[in-house]
Amino acid sequence: MDFNNLETDEVIGLVRRWGEEKGLDKAEPAKQFLKVTEEVGEVASALARDNQNALEDALGDTVVTLIILAEQKGLALEDCLTVAYNVIKDRNGEMKDGVFIKSEDL
């Protein structure tokens, strides 16, 4: 199998199966969230060091941990993303110091 030409949904399915094979689907979600925060810390580290390769790996690892956390809670990450998009799609706000601030927080 050529893993470089997979569609996103195929990769997500592979991650789900990998998590099941490792027993992560039955693990404690609170502990999985610790893994999420660990990977987010690696994102911060890669940004601080301006290391694009490390950033790509850390972002990917973060998504993997989120897929597994969603599965542990009986959710699909794709559905969570759709819910979030439907909340933000019409959101107004403005940029302040490089950060988007939603209008209700201004």
Image (tube, grey):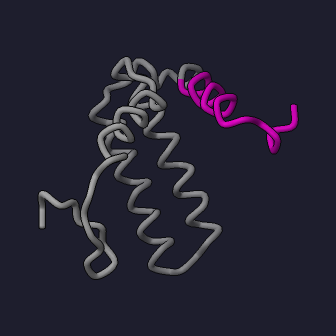
Q: Quadrant of residue 93?
A: bottom left
Residue at left offset 56%, top offset 25%: 16
Tell me which segment is drawn in magenta: 1-19
On screen, residue 10 versus residue 65, left or right, reads right
Nearer-the-camera pick, 7 or 25: 7
Name the chief secondary structure element in magenta. helix
Asked if residue 6 is among those painted magenta in the image, a careful observer would answer yes
Quarter of the rendering occupied by the N terminus: top right
Q: Relative to 4, is 82 on the left or the right? A: left
Does the magenta-highlighted stretch encompass residue 71? Answer: no
Question: Tag count in the figure?
Answer: 0
User: Percent x, y for residue 89?
Assistant: 37, 46
Using the image, determine if residue 98 lies above or below residue 13: below
Which residue is found at the position 60% from the left and 31% from the top?
A: 12
| Residue for point 66% across, 36% down | 8
* Residue 94 image-quadrant placement: bottom left
